[in-house]
């Protein structure tokens, strides 16, 4: 494996009732902060109901964020491909690819909120079937093909993109997966990346990691494609502080609302109903491996476990949760950039090695320094004596 990338997966999750204008600006500020902290990627979600996840168009958000950042790559995390005409999805992403000079990525999924799909007359089963159909169309369009096809929601007649992608041959495309084999199957079939949103959210998701890439390889062999672990992204919620006690205090700001949203509002099948005591929620988060509320050392330990469980992957994405207030959230990402990412990117050990080499010869070097000072002092005194 190459250098492990680090990024953020920003749905976003905001407490219901907050000023949405201010919350959206805070999301943009966070992406700017990630860019300054040298994070590699930020993925932005698409949701249309339920009150907490308030970005309806990741493409529009990415266009705004791209103007405020310099190097971070920006992905749709994810475009609910089943909701859209696949021709326009491909066309919009190619436009963004040009506008950002190759800093966009396309993540696709069936749509996670049943209240979203219900408003356009689709149920979750139909969304999953449409994802298969629409993804095939998007991939063909991005290869430059002319597509004639009829799906449950759209008809395309000799559809073709007028622009080729700025990225050569194309920007990264990933398929979302939770615990089921659906995402890995589609990724393998088309030779795409995998975005494991449920990598740690359930024991089933964590246990499935070791099998996901095997499913991708099996499908790739069947369809004559290739898959690459470097294009596998894992998502995990984390909040980091200088001490475990500080981290636990920080998350009292919003952890309960985050769990209640998934358990009581969003109809997300992998969460319970919420309502547990805060101390119990924090303990469960850490002990189950669902996430980390603690220190950089604990975060490094969890990433090591994910690498071992999966066999290796390309990007570690920190889920944006609003567990903590904005200042503590920014500090958490700073600590991840400063004390977690370098451990997995080959930047920490050379510095420790350099310090060890210097420390190992300090006594000899110290003696040499004193000798040099004494020599120059004697030389100067001799010069003074010669003038008398």
Image (cartoon, rainbow, N blue to C red):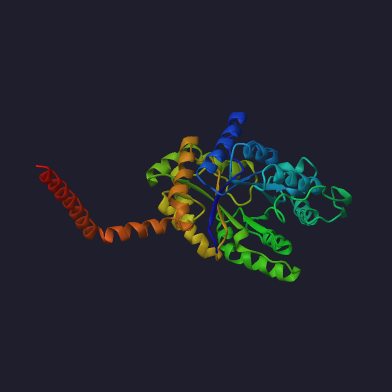
158 left or right of 58 in image: right
Figure disc tally: 0
| 235 and 363: which is toward the camera | 363
Q: Is residue 240 visible?
A: yes
Q: Quadrant of the C terminus?
A: top left
Q: Where is residue 181 in the image (x, y as percent from the top left)?
A: 67, 62
Left or right, 158 with respect to 73, comes to right
- Residue lying furthest front in this view? 387
188 in relation to 240, above or below: below
**Viewer-nearest residue: 264 or 1:** 1
In the rendered image, the residue lying farthest to the right is: 157
Q: Please state the horizontal and vertical placement of residue 342, each as a whole percent of the image.
A: 46, 54
Does residue 282 appear in the picture of this structure?
Answer: no
> Which of the 4 quarters of the picture holds residue 65?
top right
- The quadrant the N terminus occupies is bottom right
Nearest the viewer among 13 and 353 is: 353
In the image, 311 versus 387, the foreground residue is: 387
State the image coordinates of residue 254 (x, y, percent, origin top left).
51, 38
Residue at screen point 53% across, 47% down: 39
Residue 49 place in picture, x, y as percent: 69, 38
């Amino acid at each position: 494996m190459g250098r492990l990338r680090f990024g953020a997966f920003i749905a976003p999750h905001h407490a219901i009732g907050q000023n949405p204008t201010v919350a959206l600006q805070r999301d943009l500020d966070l992406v700017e902060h990630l860019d300054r902290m040298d994070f590699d990627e930020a993925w932005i979600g698409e949701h249309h109901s339920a009150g907490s996840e308030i970005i309806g168009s990741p493409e529009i958000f990415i266009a705004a964020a791209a103007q405020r950042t310099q190097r971070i790559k920006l992905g749709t995390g994810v475009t609910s491909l089943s909701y859209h005409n696949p021709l326009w999805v491909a066309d919009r992403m190619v436009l963004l690819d040009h506008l950002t000079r190759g800093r966009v990525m396309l993540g696709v999924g069936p749509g996670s909120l049943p209240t979203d799909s219900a408003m356009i007359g689709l149920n979750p089963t139909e969304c999953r079937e449409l994802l298969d159909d629409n993804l095939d169309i998007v991939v063909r369009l991005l290869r430059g093909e002319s597509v004639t096809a009829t799906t449950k929601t759209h008809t395309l007649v000799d559809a073709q993109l007028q622009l080729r992608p700025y990225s050569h041959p194309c920007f990264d495309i990933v398929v979302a997966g939770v615990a089921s084999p659906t995402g890995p199957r589609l990724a393998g079939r088309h030779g795409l990346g995998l975005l494991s949103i449920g990598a740690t959210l359930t024991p089933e998701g964590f246990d499935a990691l070791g099998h996901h890439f095997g499913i991708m390889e099996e499908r790739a062999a069947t369809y004559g494609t290739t898959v690459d672990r470097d294009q596998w992204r894992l998502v995990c919620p984390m909040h980091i502080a200088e001490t475990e006690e500080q981290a636990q205090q920080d998350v009292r700001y919003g952890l309960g609302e985050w769990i209640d949203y998934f358990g009581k509002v969003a109809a997300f099948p992998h969460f319970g109903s919420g309502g547990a005591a805060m101390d119990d929620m924090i303990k469960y988060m850490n002990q189950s491996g669902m996430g980390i509320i603690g220190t950089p050392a604990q975060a490094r330990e969890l990433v090591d476990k994910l690498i071992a469980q999966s066999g290796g992957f390309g990007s570690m994405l920190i889920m944006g949760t609003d567990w903590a207030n904005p200042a503590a959230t920014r500090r958490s990402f700073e600590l991840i950039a400063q004390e977690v990412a370098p451990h997995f990117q080959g930047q920490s050990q050379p510095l420790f090695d350099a310090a060890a080499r210097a420390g190992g010869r300090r006594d000899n070097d110290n003696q040499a320094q004193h000798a040099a000072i004494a020599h120059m002092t004697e030389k100067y005194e001799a010069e003074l004596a010669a003038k008398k």
